[in-house]
Amino acid sequence: MNRKLISQTLNEWRANLWLAVELLIVSVIVWYAIDFCYVKILDYSSPLGFEIDHTYKIKVDEISENSPEYVDRDSEGYIADKLELIDRIRHRPDVECASWSNFAHPYNYNVSCHQYHVDTIKTQGNVRRKADPDFFKVFRIRGINGETSDELAAMFRERGVVISSNLFDDAIDARTLIGDSIYSHSDRAIAVGAVISPMKMSEYSLLIYGCKTVIESDKIERMNDLCVRIHANMDNDFIGKFMADADRHYRVGNLYIGSVTSFDSLRDFFNSESEREVILMVTAVVFLLVNIFLGLFGTFWFRTQQRVSEIAIRKVNGATYSDIFRRFIGEGIVILSIVTPIALGMDAALVSHELNEMYEDNFFSWGRFLICAAITYLLLAVMIVLGIMVPALRAMRLQPAIALHDE
């Protein structure tokens, strides 16, 4: 951008002042809208950390004590029944693996939160999941160092809990904790057996909340979610076939099969409300951006229309179309470039006062801030170019004598 153009624009500051104020306000609003959309896209596109293809949740119910079919069972009998039930399911020809868990599987409204620490460094916003070793096989969870789900299951069984790589953010490299211990809020030492990639609760869960995970083992009598993975070629009416066998093969003690639901269905139901909210919010953001575009377009259109005589004089003095375009568009870009640093300062103030809820718990990053600032600048620049180009092109088609005569 040449020095002469910048000097001329600054010398005309009285004429450009209100335009600069408008661009400043618009820049802050557009940055906020762009940042919101960027976060939503980032959340949705980030890896889930698990796979749900060919997976199902089996609802296991218990016969009421008032039922004539009820069988007295002590704690050991109840445990034996649960082990027997899952063993029978594992021996089905179409089942690849099965797992008992509690508050562990994805697309689950019931979340157990717990705090862990190493020395003085504490976790925030983490999710505690209780599961048996086959949980890793059912959801094809992989280790951060390339461990397969089978290897993770063995590590979990032999060494202790499995944690996600971001459990302590950047304060601790989670891989250095393998073979060491983390501590619960009651200072109970828990051995770390392996580290996995962040495991979200759903596609729409915020990166910081759905992904900090500690998977622990638990007593089987306290794990009530039964999840299975079937072989890839066995999806044809699995639910119907399974339920047809439920009364004959999967009635154990007081336990019986209530229903079977695919995780595809659970995902659709779990995400339905979030999808509606996102559609509504994105629609509002798009509506806002369209109105801003029309406002800026109108401002620069009117501004250029008022300068038809100036365009005519420049043509008389030998200016080409490209010269006039560069002059007028360059002027708009100069004003935008001047107000952008001020707008970024106001954006940073919004962040520092946590007026954007997505920045809680240090979720903010300067990289994302600058990316959204760059997108905002380019978007406003496009609006300016279009707002100037169309009326300027029409004005340049007029003969200079006619344009000056009208003046």
Image (spheres, grey):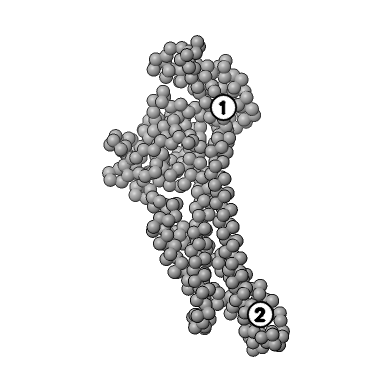
Q: On the image, numbered disc 2 is attached to which residue? A: 321
Q: Label 2 neighbourhood size at 10 Å, few (<14), some (14-19), many (20+)? A: some
Q: Residue at x 66, y 86 (%)?
A: 407
Q: Label 1 neighbourhood size at 10 Å, few (<14), some (14-19), many (20+)? A: some
- Residue 111, image x, y percentages: 43, 36
Q: Residue at x 31, y 37 (%)?
A: 184
Q: Which residue ends up furthest to the top in the rendered image? A: 68
Q: On the image, numbered disc 1 is attached to which residue? A: 260
Q: Amino acid at mark 2?
A: Tyr
Left or right, residue 288 beside residue 147:
right
Q: Earlier in the sequence, mark 2 or mark 1?
A: 1
- Residue 42 or 349: which is nearer the viewer? 349
Left or right, residue 272 beside residue 123:
right
- Residue 242, image x, y percentages: 59, 23
Left or right, residue 395 beside residue 119:
right
Q: Residue at x 57, y 38 (%)?
A: 268
Q: Which mark is residue 107?
A: none
- Residue 381 or 130: which is nearer the viewer? 381
Residue 350 vs 71, above or below: the answer is below
Q: Residue at x 59, y 78 (%)?
A: 328
Can residue 98 be seen in this snapshot?
no
Q: Give the structural element (helix, strand or loop) at label 2.
A: helix
Question: Tags 2 and 1 in contact by the CB under 8 Å rule?
Answer: no
Q: Amino acid at mark 1?
A: Val
Can residue 301 be seen in this snapshot?
yes
Q: Give the structural element (helix, strand or loop) at label 1.
A: strand
Q: Which residue ends up furthest to the bottom in the rendered image? A: 317
3D distance between C-alphas at marks 2 and 1: 70 Å
Quarter of the image where one finds residue 165 = top left
